[in-house]
């Protein structure tokens, strides 16, 4: 790695050690999650402002991460769009997994469908194996035991 790239890499790494940068990143995560939830709820910013009886500029600040959100603000926005929110506390080294319930249901259904298809394939393979085994026994005049020994060899 050349010197400029190395220096840039060190600068970038040190930036993430800064507490203000870490806070801003978390604030943006929350703002993005709220904005996505509002969009998924099918509301425009103007409609949300009317529903909350806020000025549109306040909604914009909340959904762009331009304001320091309080729990009350988050509660009001979530309630207005029919959602609850949870707080997850974890060690910095632990990963957080956020599972979208719709995506979870879709994955579960796909798994069930794949399981059903796998079962059908297994049944078809079993039937085919039986037919092949019966034909081999019929044409070669082996007993079942002789056939098993032959297959094992």
Image (spheres, helix red, strand yellow):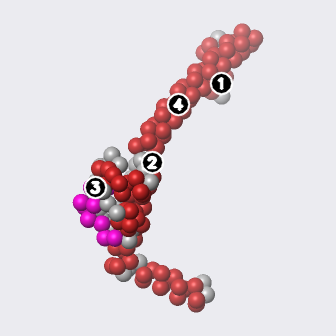
- Element type at mark 3: helix
Relative to residue 50, is residue 66 depicted above or below? below
- Residue at the disc numbered 1: 151
Q: Residue furthest right?
A: 139
- 88 lies left or right of 41: left
Magenta stretch bounds: 67-77
Whichever of callouts 2 and 4 sits on the residue coming sooner in the sequence is 2
Whichever of callouts 1 and 4 sits on the residue coming sooner in the sequence is 4
Q: Give whichever of 37, 123 is nearer the camera.
A: 37
Q: Residues within 10 Å of mark 2 (few under 14, many from 20)?
A: few
Q: Is residue 148 visible?
A: no
Camera-near label (2 vs 4) is: 2
Q: Are marks 1 and 3 in contact (CB under 8 Å)?
A: no
Q: Give whichever of 29, 98 is nearer the camera.
A: 29
Relative to residue 85, is residue 138 depicted above or below? above
Camera-near label (1 vs 3) is: 3
Q: Main secondary structure of the magenta part?
A: helix
């Amino acid at each position: 790695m050349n010197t400029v790239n190395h220096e840039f890499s060190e600068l970038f790494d040190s930036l993430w050690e800064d507490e203000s940068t870490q806070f801003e990143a978390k604030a943006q995560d929350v703002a993005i999650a709220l904005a996505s939830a509002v969009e998924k709820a099918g509301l425009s910013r103007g409609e949300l402002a009317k529903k909350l009886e806020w000025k549109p500029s306040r909604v914009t600040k909340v959904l762009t991460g331009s304001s320091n959100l309080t729990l009350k603000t988050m509660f009001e926005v979530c309630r207005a769009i029919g959602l609850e929110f949870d707080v997850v506390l974890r060690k910095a080294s632990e990963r957080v997994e956020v599972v979208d319930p719709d995506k979870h249901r879709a994955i579960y259904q796909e798994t069930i469908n794949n399981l059903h298809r796998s079962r059908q394939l297994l049944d078809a393979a079993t039937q085919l194996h039986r037919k092949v085994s019966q034909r081999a026994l019929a044409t070669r005049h082996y007993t079942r035991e002789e056939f098993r020994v032959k297959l094992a060899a």
